Amino acid sequence: MLKKGTKAHSIFLVKCPKCQDEYLFEERTFSFRKSFQMRKACPQCQQDFEPEPGFYYGAMFISYIFMGWFCIGFVALLHWVLDFSLEFSFIALILVVAFFFVYIFRLARSIWLSLNVKYDPSKSRK
């Protein structure tokens, strides 16, 4: 599923969608030093990661939709299926979302960029 050359590889590993060799962000996913610092371009294939101003507005909508459904499903699972209190369910949700916030931000940007850039095997390191 995460084989090189697939969209899933570049999306879930948060790599350049054109060459799939380099990461989109300067630091690893769970590093909180430069959480939101995205590279300007790929060091391997020179793919521009900021093609135009406002390019990542679409990523904001992807993140919003994903997080909305995730939050509803998470609280419903804890409250109705596992029979936890509503207060505990929301506290657990806040803790989970706080921990994965940076990854969700990066994942949404990776999805948006991968939808707009096609993989090119000639640009990749084999």
Image (spheres, rainbow, N blue to C red):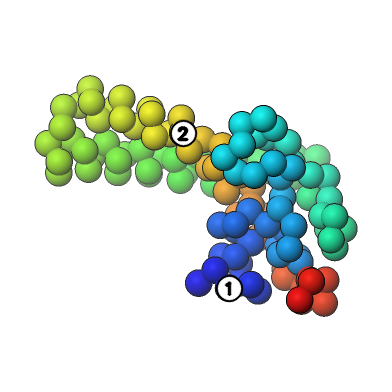
Q: Quadrant of the C terminus?
A: bottom right
Q: Residues within 10 Å of mark 1 (few under 14, many from 20)?
A: few
Q: Amino acid at mark 2?
A: Phe
Along the viewing direction, whichever of 40 and 113 lies nearer the viewer? 40
- Residue 37 image point, x, y percent: 73, 36
Rendered residue at 56%/57% (across/down)? 12
Rendered residue at 15%/32% (across/down)? 84
Q: Is residue 21 left or right of residue 105?
A: right
Rendered residue at 41%/39% (across/down)? 68
Secondary structure beneath label 1? loop
The image quarter in which residue 81 lies:
top left
Q: Residues within 10 Å of mark 2 (few under 14, many from 20)?
A: few
Considering only order in the chain, which callout, 1 or 2, is on the residue closer to the N terminus? 1
Circles 2 and 1 in contact, beta carbons < 8 Å: no
Position above or below: 125 against 51: below
Distance between mark 2 and mark 1 Cα atoms: 27 Å
Q: Amino acid at mark 1?
A: Lys
Q: Which residue is mark 2?
A: 99
Along the viewing direction, whichever of 100 and 32 lies nearer the viewer? 32
* Residue 116 seen anywhere in this rendered image of the structure: no
Q: Which residue is mark 1?
A: 3
